[in-house]
Image: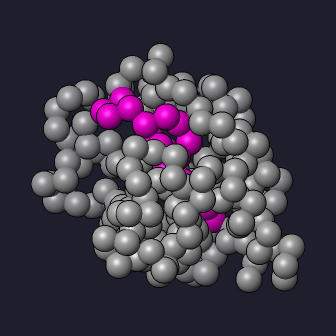
Amino acid sequence: MLTPKLIVIDRDGTLIRHIPYLCEPTQVEILSTVRDGLARLQAAGCLLFLHTNQSGVGRGYFALEVAMCCNDEMLRQLGFGDQLFAAVCVCPEAPDEVIEYRKPSPRFGQEMLARYGKNAGDICYVGDNVTDLLTAKNIGCQGLGVNTGVHDLHRELAAQGLAEHFPVYASFGEAVDSLLARSEAS
């Protein structure tokens, strides 16, 4: 199996330390193995995308611009420039609102597949929350979990009956190792 060429990555708990309702750019902290993992994905020719639920906006805790400032700080700390992600989807909906892009909605991933003329075998979701992997399930694509957030992803997947469907790695770097090993094995 070849490495998917479209990699959709969650933000909080996957790329940066999870802080509930993060609204202070000064609190953005890149997780270990993330910079190297992103560099290796880029070197392998993958297009990277960011898909992040930000229900604090929908709940009125902070403005969308504040969430975007946190994204900008993350990009600054990563040091890859503003064009690291081919597209960014910040989902401001609260869980009780009509869902358009909020994960586990497949809409963003499906739009990226259409935009790039790819199919579900060409995309992979990577994240620390069951909603990231439910998004992958809803698209019918590969999903990889990283146990770097505040949830016990193994337990959450087991509770949803999904433990057999999605591998979970201890770090973003290990998830990238798995993705890239697929190309080497082919």
How are the residues colored? one colour
**Res. 139 visible in picture:** no
Q: Principal SS element in the magenta part? A: loop
Front residue of 138 and 169: 169
Percent coordinates x, y for residue 129 in the rendering: 41, 56
Residue 136 appears in the picture as rendered: yes
Vertical order, 142 against 146 (above or below): below
Kindly indicate the quadrant of the structure image that contains residue 84.
top right
Q: Is residue 11 above or below residue 128?
A: above
Q: Residue at x 26, y 43 (%)?
A: 55
Q: Quadrant of residue 12?
A: top left
Is 70 or 151 nearer to us in this picture?
A: 151
Give the farthest residue toward the top.
Answer: 26
Q: Is residue 95 magenta?
A: no
Image x and y of residue 134, in percent = 38, 70
- Of residues 156 and 7, which is closer to you in this image? 156
Instruction: Give, as a single range, the part of the protein colored magenta.
Output: 6-22
Residue at 45% in and 45% down: 149
Taking the image as shown, residue 37 lies to the left or right of residue 91, namely right
Q: Quadrant of the C terminus?
A: bottom right
**x, y percentage for residue 86?**
61, 51
Q: Position of residue 60 (x, y in %)?
A: 17, 32
Q: Quadrant of the N terminus?
A: bottom right
- Residue 4 falls left or right of residue 135: right
Magenta stretch: residue 14 in it?
yes
Q: Quadrant of residue 80?
A: top right
Which residue is most to the left? 96
Residue at coordinates 42% horizontally, 32% vertically from top-left?
Answer: 68
Q: How many circles with numbers are drawn on the protein?
A: 0
